[in-house]
Amino acid sequence: MKNTAAMLGLAVACASVLAQAQDVAPAEQERYFALLGSSLTGPDDRRNPRVDGALGAELRFGAHPAAGGWGYELRAFQESLEKAADGDKGNRGGLGVDAIYRLPRLLHLTAYGLGGMALAYSDALPGRDWVAPVVNAGAGVETGPLLNLMGHALKFRVEGRYSYEDNRDEYTTPTQVDRANYVETRLYAGFSLAFAKAEPPPEVRVIESVPEPEPVVAPLAEPVAPGDTDGDGIPDDRDRCAASELGQPVDDEGCTTLKVPKSD
């Protein structure tokens, strides 16, 4: 019953993460595949049967904003458990989903933290196999592009995870139930290959405001002195006798003041 509820919870978590990812425009996302090797570096002593370690591999698909921030990873994992008692092998595998947060790149490296859920299948006990919910959290670091393979960036990444696996549904006695929750650490290393790289946003050029030109003030034209057609010293605009003879005395209106004697 608990495992059924865990499966429903995992489905809801997957749907929620994927729905939120759709809010980011495709042109602003970087999508990738990752292939990583895993090593169980801290097996829980309560495992039954006890294991000395495990080696495995993971295939992941993920997407995140190119500039950093929240993204997601879907993961499929498989590992071989090495039993301590008889040296026999057991298998463990499953599917999971993680939320991942990437910090801005610094010195060609990108640090990230992640957390999520998984359902793990195991056949470690002879004649028995089961599915158990797993909660995990971890952190890692990824390099910048190491190679450009036909336009796809190849990167290297390492990470560590801390996981809690609940196997209580598979045991019956109180002693077994108390030993059924595994808290373990794993190390991962591998490569990611971007298959849909985010396109950089178009460059926005800021055009500085151009100052308005100062108005050009035309120099004032020098006044043109009115003409004096008959040369009597009275401007034409005041000359009422514009055809007075040259040299004759005139009054202020340009008319001659010379009296012509009357003939008898």
Image (tube, helix red, strand yellow):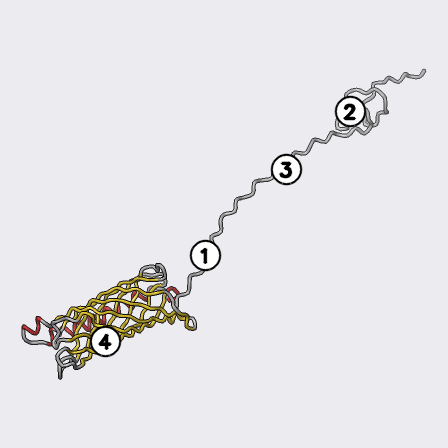
* Residue in the image at 11% along x and 76% along y: 48
The residue type indicated by label 3 comes to: Ala
Q: Sequence-wise, which precedes: disc 4 or disc 2?
A: 4
Q: How far apart are the alpha carbons under marks 2 and 1?
A: 72 Å
Residue receiving disc 2: 234
Q: Are marks 2 and 1 in contact (CB under 8 Å)?
A: no
Q: How far apart are the alpha carbons under marks 2 and 3?
A: 32 Å
Query: Which of 79/199 is in front?
Result: 79
Task: Locate the C terminus and report the quarter of the image it occupies.
Answer: top right
Residue receiving disc 3: 218
Residue receiving disc 4: 55
The residue type indicated by label 1 comes to: Val
In what element is the residue under mark 4?
Answer: strand
Q: Sequence-wise, which precedes: disc 2 or disc 1?
A: 1
Q: Which mark is residue 204?
A: 1
Disc number lying in front (2 or 3): 3
In what element is the residue under mark 3?
Answer: loop
